[in-house]
Image (cartoon, rainbow, N blue to C red):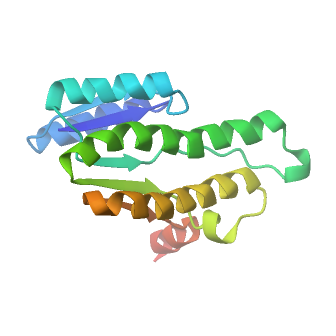
Amino acid sequence: RIYLNYSSDSEAVVQTEKFVAEADGCATGRRVNVASEKDVSEFVKLAQDETGRVDVMVNNAGITGDNLLMRMKPEDWSSVLRVNLDGTFNCTRIFCKDMVRARWGRIINISSVAGLVGNSGQTHYSASKAGMIGLTRSLSRELAPRKVTVNAVAPSRSFLLWRRNN
């Protein structure tokens, strides 16, 4: 059973629901603002009511709006940090409660190489992804005694582009 949240690409969620159904699974997509604790809480309640608990959670929400820092509007900075970092905090804090009670769970955070090395024009995105890496490292130490693992994956766009061309 898979629960998907999205903010804008509902067609991709419909396609994923169909793909999972073809593999004899069940997927449910919901529009969720991960920056909203209320939205995330309602999403978790849906999953808990239907399945009893959540075993694996992937934080994959992320936005950017490339611009040089000196030209960046404060609201652009805030919106990227709210979705990318606050969203990870909201989802992880709420979802991990079931995992701690069950003494088993997996949390996977999709970060970025930009969080490790930075990217010109992406100070807000890089800062949010670096924050996600720090959150992952600290939380993994907190939850390891309860058999809940927390890991981050940091894909690189240049690697993906290179693979497409070869």
- The image shows a total of numbered marks equal to 0
Q: Quarter of the image holding residue 2? A: top left
Q: Return the x and y of residue 81 as percentages of the image width and height.
A: 66, 43
Q: Return the x and y of residue 20 as percentages of the image width and height.
A: 19, 41
Q: Nearer the viewer, residue 61 or 38?
A: 38
Report the side of 17 relative to 11 (left or right).
left
Q: Is residue 31 visible?
A: no
Q: Is residue 141 visible?
A: yes
Q: Return the x and y of residue 152 as percentages of the image width and height.
A: 44, 62
Reply above or below: 115 against 106.
below
Residue at x 82% of width, y 37% of height: 74
Residue at x 43% of width, y 33% of height: 6
Report the side of 160 relative to 76 (left or right).
left
Quadrant (top left, top right, bottom left, bottom right) of the N terminus: top left
Residue at x 69% of width, y 56% of height: 127
Q: Nearer the viewer, residue 49 or 70?
A: 49
Quadrant (top left, top right, bottom left, bottom right) of the C terminus: bottom left
Q: Quarter of the image holding residue 35? A: top right
Q: Residue furthest right?
A: 70
Residue at x 51% of width, y 43% of height: 89
Q: Nearer the viewer, residue 3 or 156?
A: 3
Q: Residue furthest left?
A: 24
Report the side of 131 relative to 3 (left or right).
right
Q: Return the x and y of residue 30 as percentages of the image width and height.
A: 36, 26
Report the side of 4 relative to 152 (left or right).
left
